Image (cartoon, helix red, strand yellow):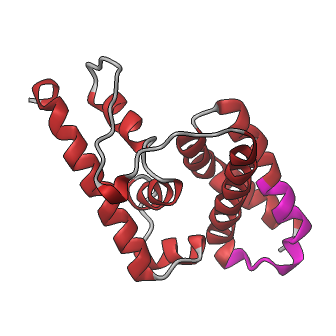
Amino acid sequence: MTDSEFNKIVEMYSDSIYRFVLKSLRDKNTAKDLMQDVYERVWIKRQNVNIEKAKSYLFTTAYHCMIDLIKQKNRFVSIETANIEKNETVIIENNYNNIKEIIDELSNKLPEIQKMVLMLRDYEDYSYEEIGKITGLTESQVKVYIYRARIFLKNNLKRYQHLIF
């Protein structure tokens, strides 16, 4: 990839990658910092990046940067999460009047991998195959994670039925 091609992909994909990162991290400053890391990594390896696969490469790099950041944070902070595998109910104490807020709050209760594959599929409109390449998962694993995330959201949205209907 040439310098001008690098500038072109920065211009073309910055918004969508930023949305992906921001939706995952929910902190504008951290998302901006991570974006810098993503483009720094791509710049360093620009000679090895094929311009036709640049978008996928950028999302993959962003995904790996987020995983690294999350692992780093988990070393220092103990996070209590719902055990979705055992079907424990997530209790949300906030009062909501907006469905988007409810979905965002519930999405934040998902395990990171489920949250990321769901966002790549539903917000960024990637195919299962493309998500697999970005995350390093098989296509069937991607489908399972998306299915589990959607079931979790569906089951927990039932509590807010009076707000939705």
Asked if residue 68 is positioned above or below residue 155 in the image, the reply reads below
Q: Residue at x 27, y 30 (%)?
A: 99
- Percent x, y for residue 120? 47, 59
Left/right of residue 2 with respect to residue 101 in the rendered view: right
The secondary structure that most of the magenta stretch takes on is helix
Q: Residue at x 25, y 56 (%)?
A: 151
Left/right of residue 125 with respect to residue 135 in the rendered view: left
- Percent x, y for residue 114? 44, 59
Asked if residue 94 is positioned above or below residue 132 in the image, the reply reads above
Q: Quarter-wise, where is residue 63 in the image?
A: bottom right
Asked if residue 148 is positioned above or below residue 96 in the image, the reply reads below
Q: Residue at x 72, y 37 (%)?
A: 30
Quadrant of the image for the C terminus?
top left
- Percent x, y for residue 35? 74, 47
Asked if residue 49 is positioned above or below residue 119 in the image, the reply reads below
Quadrant of the image for the N terminus?
bottom right
Residue 143 among magenta residues: no
Instruction: Between residue 18 and residue 159, name the one nearer to us.
Output: 159
Instruction: Between residue 36 and residue 137, name the one nearer to us.
Output: 137
- Percent x, y for residue 147? 30, 65
Q: Residue at x 67, y 53 (%)?
A: 66
Q: Quarter-wise, where is residue 44 in the image?
A: bottom right
Left/right of residue 60 with respect to residue 121 in the rendered view: right
Q: Which residues are magenta?
A: 38-52
Number of disc labels: 0
